[in-house]
Amino acid sequence: GIRGVERSRGLGDVYKRQVIHVDEGTKRISLGPESAGSAVGTCYTYPDITIGDIDLILGFLNEDYFLGGKVKLNKQRALQMLQERLADPLGQDVYDVSSKVLDLLHSQMCDHLSSMLLSKGLNPAEFTMLAYGGSGPLHVWGLERGMPTAGVIMVPWAAAFSAFGCAAAEYFHRYDKAVTFFLTPDMTDDIKLYQGSVLSTAWAELEQQGYEELEREGIPRDKVRFRHGISGRYIGQMANWEAPVEISRVETVEDVEKVISSFERVYTNIYPVAARFPDVGYQITDVYVEAIGEKIKPTIPKYARKASIPSERASKGQRDVYIDGQWTKFDIWEMDLLEAGNHIDGPAIIEHPMTTLVIPPQNYVEFDEHRFIRYSTKQ
């Protein structure tokens, strides 16, 4: 669920209605791995307390507007169950401890995303976070606080974004092949080229598989392009690192060096330059080819920018929300009635039948010319 576009990284449906477990002996809280899914929590039909119950009692969710009002949530039952199963066993205030559970959720999500990106040599601060899924916008405020990024963006149709992504994503097949390739500093150029021919042969074989398979699926050869890569390590290491390669054949010694440089670039993105160990030589264990077929891409519509102040008809009044240890009045807005150019200051909640966007007091959002929602911090 993560894809890079113009130095962006999309965030899949990071929030799940995870079950909350309380260990009365150790006074510890753990989340999941079970999720209530469409049963939401004790506020609907699930037997155990969940993050969904917490979102409801703290005021983030509207009990009368879940799925546009088609599903009625029971806020009083959620409060009772959280009191009995969470607050009482821990001897804490139900609202305060529920808020701390959200802190735990957000911390775990930030740790997971950061480690996933850093393990690939990617710095989260260089990427825009795209929050989607029905519940992505509901908890993006906690992610934004805990993980610095270049920006945060959402779309009004966040609940359908996964389906949109499947329809808009590249159409490609990936092919992998194990190879045996060693390159040591004492090798002559002739031996380096001979070794390099192993890569060329393997890539050519995988390309042929790609041509044949995509052709059977109705994509002619002249509409197919390829991306190439390797998986390698320093000789003696146990782990491999995957690296895209700009060339498709190894025909010169310079081409061999380009392959090695691709590995070094990925390695030094993940580890300090001082951790390099080229003197022992390199081992390439796998190659891959991605066969990409051309497809029609969707056009994102543009809208005329309206005034920064939203229309009054988009306002739905106010609601008390428990955040940062206190009850705060949040302005409530209807997402479908907000327009390109509108600016919404927090504290605010923007509701939609399929999603809810929470904007804490220190944040604001702007709807750009595509009606994409750009989430920022007040200066």
Image (cartoon, helix red, strand yellow):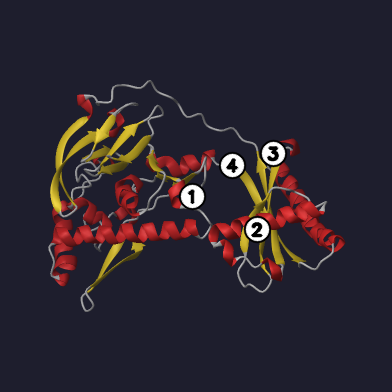
- Could you tell me which residue is drawn at 62 percent across and 73 percent down? 238
Q: Are marks 1 and 4 in contact (CB under 8 Å)?
A: no
User: Residue reaching furthest right?
Assistant: 190
Question: Which kind of residue does numbered mark 2 sit on?
Answer: Phe
Classify mark 4: helix, strand or loop. Answer: loop
Residue under pointer 1: 2
Q: CA distance from mark 1 to mark 2?
A: 22 Å
Using the rendered view, name the quadrant where residue 24 is placed. Answer: bottom left
- Marked residue nearer the N-terminal end (3 or 4): 4
- Number of the front mark, 3 or 4: 4
Residue under pointer 2: 263
- Number of the front mark, 4 or 2: 2
Q: Are marks 1 and 3 in contact (CB under 8 Å)?
A: no
Q: Residues within 10 Å of mark 1 (few under 14, many from 20)?
A: few
Rendered-image quadrant of the C terminus: top left
Q: CA distance from mark 4 to mark 2?
A: 25 Å
Residue 107, percent from left and from top: 33, 60
- Marked residue nearer the N-terminal end (3 or 2): 3
Classify mark 3: helix, strand or loop. Answer: loop
Residue under pointer 3: 218
